Amino acid sequence: MTTADVPGPLSGVSGWLDEHLGAAAFLRRNMRKVFPDHWSFLLGEIALYSFVVLLLTGTFLTFWFKPSMGHVIYDGSYEPLKGLMMSEAYASSLDISFDVRGGLLIRQTHHWAALLFIAGMVVHMLRVFFTGAYRKPRELNWIIGVLLFTLALAEGVTGYILPDDLLSGAGLRITQGVAISLPLVGTYIQFFLFGGEYPGDDVISRFYALHVLLIPGLLVALISAHMILMWVQKHTQMPGKNRTEHNVVGSPFYPAFMAKATAYFLFTLAILVGLGTFAQINPIWLSGPYNPADISAGSQPDWYMGVLEGALRIMPAWEINALEHTLPLSVIIPALVPLGVIITGLALYPFAERWVTGDKREHHIADRPRNNPVRTSIGMAAITFYGVLWLMGANDEISANFHISLFALTWAGRVGVFVLPILAYIITYRLCLALQREDADVIAHGVESGVIKRLPHGEFVEVHVPVDEDIEAHIKGKAAIPVLAGADAATTEGVLPSGRRSSLGRLRAWMSRMYGGEKIPLETSHREGHKSGQRAVSSS
């Protein structure tokens, strides 16, 4: 690149920095870094910008929130609660909502940003998973992403508890029940969180420290590491024309991507502020302060914790009594197993896939989900598992509004949490193969032109035209999934390779055959027998 190739503003800034810091080459190189143009690569930006909004609005809220369980008599603007005894945390939350100028807007925007932050993180992780963008050399960044997701859940839980209203108090009681049910460490965790027996006097201040100091600090550190690794490593890109494992096709960071990112941030901010203005969320004044003697019907946690709520609701009342101790499986299993399976599975998946396929190559071209049917089917099965539990978290509301027996609905959830993921796997796998056949047909016959032609012998056919070069390159970017060496067949004497003779070796070989290989080659079409460029529609 010559000086003439660098935009004027960038050249001036880099020149000033070079004179003072010797950083011109660094700035020029990084400002011209290329970002892919595919829309799905912007999903992670939603989580990033929501986190920025969370930091800004959270800082505002800390100026007025009092993280104390000390009792006060409310004397604020909300008349229905005047004269009622409550904690300072709840009273300050009411003051923020009714007496601080712009407080309710900021509090609701903060809550919506928290929901969007986790939602953006989830859809970003799904995009990375379904396209295989976690493969070498990005395994470390994938692990960081899983840790970010786990910390975001913890950040949401600690923030949900802080207002100390009846709804958050019910969530706190569930949290305490889960903590105390854990064998060996349960009582220690409870005393660490509550400073003594439930509810104690310290839980709000301790959750506040976790919510505004420890967890955000870890999130900032991990997000920074995530962004640095993303910047240093080559971007993945969808297959297409002129796209290879050794280049990136897209727009430079400056000015194209910077302008796009700025507009995207402002759009995200506008959506969140709009929701905070017009869509009421968590009206803490309606439920009143938390009192262990009070209960409420129809209470629901934020969406990201619905999976745990659903697991608790459909879990049978199992427990183990032995050696004068009780192990409440009805609490431990819902609390640890569903999210434990999902998070552990996400963390281990890149390494499990490499073990199954033996693939140690670097990958910079992303997969189309249909071209790896087993991975896509596993992902859809996990989403279905999560979705069933999430839906069961509102089984009382579903039962009341749709007049369905709560007993029948609970049993439907117990059966569905096992059966529906299997059905989702089978259906997704068949759909992926069908889409691969459709791709093969497009390559073999082209695309429909809408022109019907009658042949001399009376047959009617639709004329097809060659597929566009970009679409053809996108389809032909498909690559066969590697299969473990020696997994396909034994030697001519019928002797398996040495690494495949043990039970584990045979299992690995079988898994490799099932997972890898070319399922539907692009050279194969399911509509054989017609001339290229024509398709029969009827005969006379």
Image (cartoon, grey):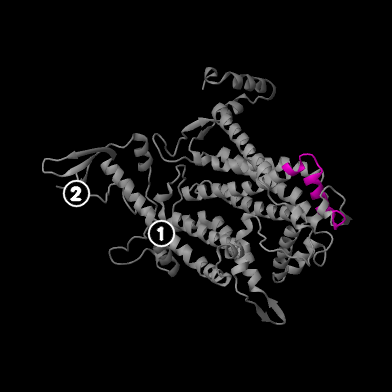
Q: Position of residue 500 (x, y in %)?
A: 40, 65
Q: Amino acid at mark 1?
A: Ile
Q: Which residue is at the front of the view, 378 or 156?
A: 156
Would residue 340 be seen by someone viewing this image from the given angle? Answer: no
Q: Is residue 443 left or right of residue 283?
A: left
Residue visible at 58% across and 35% down in the picture: 264
Mark before the other along the chain sequence, 2 or 1: 1
Q: Is residue 103 magenta?
A: yes
Residue visible at 64% across and 38% down in the picture: 269
Q: Is residue 29 magenta?
A: no
Q: Position of residue 121 (x, y in %)?
A: 59, 48
Query: Which residue is labeled 2 in the image?
Result: 529
Task: Look at the image and give the residue range highlighted in magenta.
Answer: 82-105
Q: Amino acid at mark 2?
A: Gly
SS class of the residue under badge 1?
helix
Q: Quadrant of residue 189?
A: bottom right
Would residue 444 be seen by someone viewing this image from the given angle? Answer: yes
Query: Would you place residue 523 above or below residue 390 in this image?
Result: above
Label 2 neighbour load within 10 Å: few <14, some 14-19, many 20+: few
Label 1 neighbour load within 10 Å: few <14, some 14-19, many 20+: some
Query: Would you place residue 161 above or below residue 293 in this image?
Result: above
Residue visible at 44% across and 60% down in the picture: 425
Query: Which residue is labeled 1 in the image?
Result: 427
Q: Which residue is at the front of the view, 193 or 300?
A: 300
SS class of the residue under badge 2?
loop
Q: Position of residue 539 (x, y in %)?
A: 16, 48
